[in-house]
Image: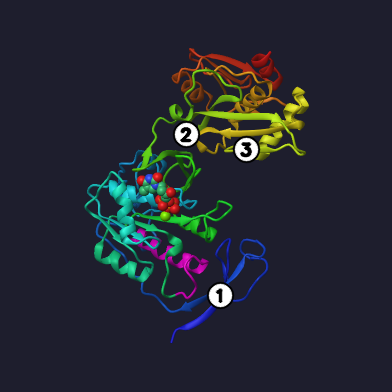
Amino acid sequence: MAKTQITFFCKNCGASSGKWIGKCPSCGEWNTYVEEVVHKEKAEFKKTWKKEGVTRTLKPVLIDEVERGNEQRIALQDGELSRVLGGGIVPGSVILIGGEPGIGKSTLMLQIALQFTNKKVLYISGEESDAQIKMRAERLPFSNPDCYLYTEVSTQKIGKALQELEPDIVIVDSIQTLQSELIDSTPGSISQIKETAGDLIRYAKESGTPVFLIGHITKDGTLAGPKLLEHMVDTVLQFEGDRHHVYRILRTTKNRFGSTSEIGIYEMQSGGLREVSNPSEILISQRDESLSGVSIAATIEGMRPLLIETQALVSTAVYGTPQRNSNGYDAKRLNMLLAILEKKCGLKMGMQDVFVNIAGGLRVEDPGIDLSIVAAIVSSYENVPIDSKICFIGEVGLSGEIRAVNRIEQRISEAEKLGFKTVYLSKFNKLPLEKNKITIVQVGKLEELLSNLFG
Ligand code: TYD
Ligand code: MG
């Protein structure tokens, strides 16, 4: 008979203990221990997954003597994912991709599976039936005759299938649905995630087969399950965007084999996700006349310069407390900008409702967008449009000073490429040496900018 045992796990770091503890001794967090039932019986998945041509060191060796091997990255047809991963998939790597429900994780991974032409892909799903996945696949404009579907949640059965099929690439949708028969707790619990992810990671490392794990995220936007999961995998990708808009951003938050500052941009269409290779052109809405409350920011997302339209609406508050609402821009930062405008520029923001929106449903973290947000707010407040050929770069400091931002050359040249005539930026930014066609206006304080724009 199997021995049943109750164990307590820390939700934060995955540490375990025989009894409940208030403060986790390993990560120091309070109230993170939860109870789970664990069957202690070993272990069917634990096999070795040796494959020919993949060398694994079994004893200490000198680093100079290790052969790098011919482990070349697996090329991807999808240029955006390829860039985000640092140029293709590293054999034996485990990639975790997280995102809100309905954002398109399953669509993206199925699409990647179908894009391979000479690779055997196994798509394991614990969320949908074969027929549902087939229906989704029919909407996508790709086909891979060597793509297998397997709807199974038990890692022991998955292990057998992996052994028989010997796929080149494995996709698991999702890690929270997997279940190890050795553990009694429900799928998605900490001990299950630890065990099943551990099995798959060992499979990936030993067989040299890359594994993609789709992961759910919790309400506050972090990946569900123990933080430990993020430590265990090689790469963590975040798929984000506004479900009601068509654009999606794929970001890396961790990458052992590449930089974490790359992003991929997709557009959700009726036939799957389309790569967006020239994002600036679509993020600026087409308009003939200049409208008040609209301005363009030259930002950097990841490594890529991106011109984004920022919009603001300022109107007199009719009922009691004025409303502040922000879409795609940090709401606390918006309040800060409004306080600076009130204190330093004498605008009566206290009596106004203020709404801010970033076009396309994107969420922007680059502080260089501040200047454009301020310009849009004041443009709406004064009801004076800003010329559509002007764009803005700069972070705003608490005393109303305009601070320098990074990668100024890239931002300026992107603005120039898209036909902008004038760019406002901080006077503390060093300008690129080569002569630009675009007119550069350098300002040190918000007052200067506002008197320049609105007189
Ligand atoms: P899905 O991949 O199921 O999201 P997740 O796995 O992250 O929960 O994506 C679901 C949404 O994508 C759904 O609302 C329908 C939409 N969609 C399209 O717009 N076009 C398509 O071709 C497909 C397959 C889905
Ligand atoms: Mg899904």
Residue 303's mark?
Answer: 2
Distance from mark 1 CB to nearest ligand 2 atom below 8 Å: no
Say which of marks 2 and 3 sits in front.
3
**Farthest-out residue, front:** 318
Residue for point 48% across, 83% down: 3
In-image side of 173 versus 254 (left or right): left
Q: Nearer the viewer, residue 133 or 124?
A: 133
Tell me which corner region of the image, top left, top right, bottom left or bottom right, holds residue 379.
top right
Q: Which residue is mark 3?
A: 326
Indicate the secondary structure of the residue bearing disc 3. strand
Which of the image's four quarters has the N terminus? bottom left
Q: Earlier in the sequence, mark 1 or mark 3?
A: 1
Which of the image's four quarters has the C terminus? top right
Q: Amino acid at mark 1?
A: Thr
Distance from mark 2 CB to nearest ligand 1 atom below 8 Å: no
Q: Earlier in the sequence, mark 2 or mark 1?
A: 1
| Rendering coords of residue 286 (x, y %) | 47, 24
Residue for point 52% across, 33% down: 359
In-image side of 315 versus 2 (left or right): right
Per the rendered image, the range of residues in magenta is: 183-206
Q: Amino acid at mark 3?
A: Ser
Residue 7's mark?
Answer: 1
Q: How far apart in space, not on screen, are marks 2 and 3 (Cα)?
A: 25 Å
| Rendering coords of residue 436 (x, y %) | 49, 14
Tell me which corner region of the image, top left, top right, bottom left or bottom right, holds residue 41.
bottom left
Whether the magenta-drawn stretch holds residue 211 is answered as: no
Q: Principal SS element in the magenta part? A: helix
Crowd class of label 1 (few under 14; some 14 to 19; many from 20; radius 10 Å)? some
Q: How far apart in space, not on screen, are marks 2 and 1 (Cα)?
A: 45 Å
**Farthest-out residue, bottom:** 1
On screen, residue 450 above or below 333:
above
